[in-house]
Amino acid sequence: MAVRIRLRDIEETSNELVYDEPTSELNPLVERGGVQDFEFIGPARVDLSYYRTGSELFFQATLRSRVAGQCARCLGRFELDHDPDFSFIMVPRTGRWADEELDGGGDAQLMWYEGEEVDVSPLLRERLLLALPTLALCRADCRGLCAQCGADLNVEACGCVIDAGDPRLAVLRTLRRPNEGRA
């Protein structure tokens, strides 16, 4: 479902639009080689406000969604609230903006529009994807799995003995580092 707003309906006073944005088409985009770190659960609730100043269009959005993930450390499944806020400004591709290079710097992204309406759905879906955490963790202090026996270290301590390394190098471990032990 595309949400298109006609330019003639965008006024100088702020307008509000609240609706559900489908997220099912985003799930294949977050899959990497058969591994899916995140999965959107249901649609995202969009609270969008917009207004114009001359030919420049200003948008501010709050997206509320629920995301399931697979922890990169313990491989457990978890859910989190994914609620990015963002704003963007749209300018016509004609007139004073025609030859400008839009870099979208700062908090507000700057982009072009053409025609008699703007489609905000692609921009909102892109924001949902870009705001996902770069590393899927069930919690910040997740201890992960034991590298030897595979036990979930968040649930239980394992009895594995940690190898101290090659015994032939034991004498090197007794050497002091520079500035170590000095007052």
Image: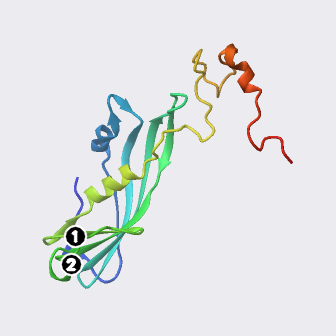
Q: What residue type is labelled 2?
A: Trp
Mark number, residue 112: 1
Q: Residue 63: percent from the left, percent from the top?
A: 41, 57
Q: In this view, does 178 lie to the left or right of 100?
A: right
The image shows a total of numbered marks equal to 2
Residue 81's spot in the image, x, y percent? 49, 48
- Choose top left, top right, bottom left or bottom right for residue 5: bottom left
Going by the image, does 107 lie left or right of 150? left
Q: Residues within 10 Å of mark 2 (few under 14, many from 20)?
A: few
* Residue projecting furthest to the left: 115
Label 2, label 1: how far apart the Cα atoms are:
8 Å
Please say if the residues under marks 2 and 1 sit with CB atoms less than 8 Å apart. Answer: yes
Left or right of residue 84, residue 43 in this image: left
SS for dot 1: strand
Residue at 77% across, 26% down: 174
> Does the rendering let one see residue 65?
yes
Label 2 sits on residue: 97
Residue located 57% across and 20% down the image: 147
The answer to which image quadrant residue 41 occupies is top left
- Taking the view exactly as shown, the residue that stands out farthest to the right is 183
How far across and how far down the image is residue 175, in percent? Answer: 76, 30
The structure residue drawn at horizontal position 45% and vertical position 38%, both measured from the top left corner, is 68
Q: In this view, does 104 lie above or below 132?
A: below
Q: How far from the left and from the top, in percent, is residue 121?
A: 27, 57
Mark 2 residue element = helix
Could you tell me the amino acid type at mark 1? Trp
Task: In this rendered view, identify the residue nearer to me: 107 or 147.
Answer: 147
User: Mark on residue 141?
Assistant: none
Circle 1 crowding by C-alpha within 10 Å: few under 14, some 14–19, many from 20: some
